[in-house]
Amino acid sequence: MITPPWPRPNTRVQRTRTLASLGALTSFARSPLTRRLLGATRKVHLALPAVLLATLGGLYVSRISEAQASPGIAPSSWVAGNRISLKVASRDEPGSVTYGFLIAANGDMQIDITEHSAKEKSSGTILLISGRVMATQGLKLEPGYEIDTLDGAGLSWQLASQLLERGAPGDPRGLKQPVQIDILEKKDSINVGTTSASGSYPPPWTAKGTVNPAGVGRVGFDVAFGFRDPGASQRTFELRYSGTWEQLQPPPQIDDSRSLKNWTIHWIGPTRRSDAGGQILDYGASPTKDQYATVGDLRKAVAKADKK
């Protein structure tokens, strides 16, 4: 498992059960992300700040357009992209993580994740099926916190898409010439959130970079996000978001015939576990030993479970 210079999306930097026990963060990129619990208050500082997931009828649904936006910023066509490559890197430390998103018209999603540190490289894939199941291959997920990798990916694109909307509003497909982004926000926070994690970056924060047309319906971007540690140190950080955006027609799809051999299946929803302090009710992705030959078989299992 690679250990990047900042906490990774699936790395638990701090996780406590009560507000009284919340302490200072100890790593780079102090993302003020709150782990949402059922029946308890606890914080988890996921790695990379940052649309992907929202709750609908208690399900973990992958409709990007339903993601939480900053105050005063309406959802735009930036969040309507269905093929996105997003690289996140630090100004101060080596290493990076790259996400490749493919979002189907029915909300199913594929996320390819590649992590680079100074000495290592690792990669893996997440499939989000029917808003209820996460299938993974090639990823080493921390037991009990498997959903953090999914959250990290979603939050990263959510933040990047909000910066792009502020700096280059409108339909990216209509971009005819490069756009320079230069934002100094002194009033409003920038907020991100999924079903199980959320965060807020208070002002002042900055966004500087460029957006460029890169072919028919394809756009390239490179934006640096500067923010302060909300704690006592007030240290400044900068994360760089770069990649490409597309809205494919027809949209991508995850075929029923796709093999799930050697994939790990995680059911998404409320979880219950015990520790020395008692029962903890959480929201996460619980691994199962159940095996399904194809994506179609998995979809049938989800439909059957929903009828119970």
Image (tube, rainbow, N blue to C red):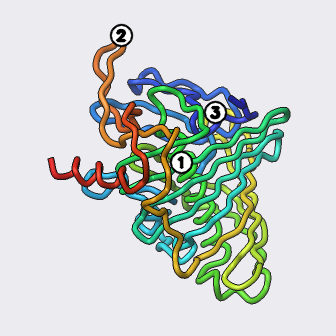
Residues packed near mark 2 inside 10 Å, few (<14), some (14 to 19) or many (20 plus): few
**Residue 118 higher or lower than 299, as above or below:** above
Q: Pick whichever, 165 or 260, lies toward us.
A: 260
Q: Secondary structure at mark 2?
A: loop
Report the residue at 25% width, 54% height from top: 303
Q: Amino acid at mark 1?
A: Ile
- N-terminal of the two: label 2 or label 1? 1
Image coordinates of residue 192 in percent, x first then y, are 51, 54
Q: Which residue, given by chain and number where applicable, does mark 1 sit on?
A: 126
Tag of residue 267: none
- N-terminal of the two: label 1 or label 3? 1
Between marks 1 and 3, how big is the CA–CA gap? 37 Å
Look at discs 2 and 1 and give the one toward the viewer: 1
Q: Pick whichever, 70 or 307, lies toward us.
A: 307
Between marks 3 and 2, how big is the CA–CA gap? 31 Å
Q: Which residue, given by chain and number where applicable, does mark 3 sit on?
A: 232
Q: Which residue, given by chain and number where applicable, does mark 2 sit on?
A: 276
Q: Secondary structure at mark 1?
A: strand
Q: Are marks 1 and 3 in contact (CB under 8 Å)?
A: no
Report the residue at 58% width, 77% height from top: 247
Report the residue at 47% width, 63% height from top: 255
Residues packed near mark 1 inside 10 Å, few (<14), some (14 to 19) or many (20 plus): many
Q: Are marks 3 and 2 in contact (CB under 8 Å)?
A: no
Report the residue at 60% width, 48% height from top: 49
Q: Amino acid at mark 2?
A: Ala
**Location of residue 178 (image quadrant):** bottom right
Q: Pick whichever, 203 or 9, lies toward us.
A: 9
Image coordinates of residue 224 in percent, x first then y, are 75, 58
Between marks 2 and 1, how big is the CA–CA gap? 32 Å
Q: Pick whichever, 130 or 258, lies toward us.
A: 258
